[in-house]
Amino acid sequence: MSGIDRLVDELKELKEGPIGDIVRQRMNEFELLGRGTEEDLFKELCFCILTANYSAERGIRIQKEIDLGFLSLPLDELARKLRELGHRYPEIRAKYIVEARKYLGKLKKVLESFDDEALLRDWLVKNVKGLGYKEASHFLRNIGFKNVAIIDFHIIDLLVKYGIIERPRSLTRKKYMEIEDILRKIAEISGLTLAELDLYLWYMETGKILK
């Protein structure tokens, strides 16, 4: 049995159990967030900027602490707050968030202007400092998009463990797309979207379902 077959079997088992219910609930929450206010979308964008090379769990805690401060705190104050809350890169993340405020009030319009999620992700990577392909994909998934993959070291570790890929020396755009194509195949065989697949894979690797 191939690594993909073994992984798909485990995914189907999880899908039919209580973890499947949690994943479906989380997907509903993402869709609701995507229909939220400009401020809701911007705060989620800030969360994804914070999680680059950083813990998602800690990013969630910081997001809750700062909340509306993402919209209005001066650069120095935002950096100080991030530092107090333990972020690894308080100054540069604060700078990226303040720069991203130029899109506050325009995010819905941008999101609705693309029919292709991959092209929308390209736009985010090009125009929002602090977002790479993983972070842009994370943002889109968390606001209800379903067809881009969040590829981080947890996902790579799991795919390597199943013998599906060899560990890449670096995650270039080309390599990201190659791994995303493999994940898309796994998702299709499993009857999942890429967004759902990420939650299951994260659970398999970490024992947690976050966002």
Image (cartoon, rainbow, N blue to C red):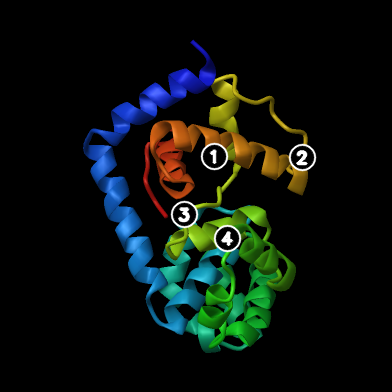
Q: CA distance from mark 3 to mark 2?
A: 25 Å
Question: Between disc 4 and disc 3, whose residue precedes?
Answer: 4
Mark 2 element type: loop
Question: Between disc 2 and disc 4, whose residue precedes?
Answer: 4
Question: Between disc 3 and disc 2, whose residue precedes?
Answer: 3
Mark closer to the observer (2, 4): 4
Question: Between disc 2 and disc 1, whose residue precedes?
Answer: 2
Can you give x and y, in whole percent of width and height, for residue 63 in the image? 45, 69
Viewer-closest of 140 and 97 = 140
Can you give x and y, in whole percent of width and height, for residue 80 in the image? 60, 77
Q: Which residue is mark 1?
A: 184
Q: Which residue is mark 3?
A: 146
Mark 2 is surrounded, within 10 Å at the Cα level, by few (under 14), some (14 to 19) or many (20 or more) other residues, namely few
Marks 1 & 3, CB-CB < 8 Å contact: no
Viewer-closest of 77 and 158 = 158
Mark 3 element type: loop
Mark closer to the observer (3, 2): 3
Q: Which residue is mark 4?
A: 117
What amino acid is labelled 2 in the image?
A: Ser
Viewer-closest of 52 and 177 = 177
Q: CA distance from mark 2 to mark 1?
A: 20 Å
Disc number for residue 170:
2
Residue 74 is left or right of residue 63, and the answer is right
The vertical placement of 148 against 121, above or below, is above
Mark 4 element type: helix
Marks 4 & 3, CB-CB < 8 Å contact: yes
What amino acid is labelled 4 in the image?
A: Glu
Mark closer to the observer (2, 1): 1
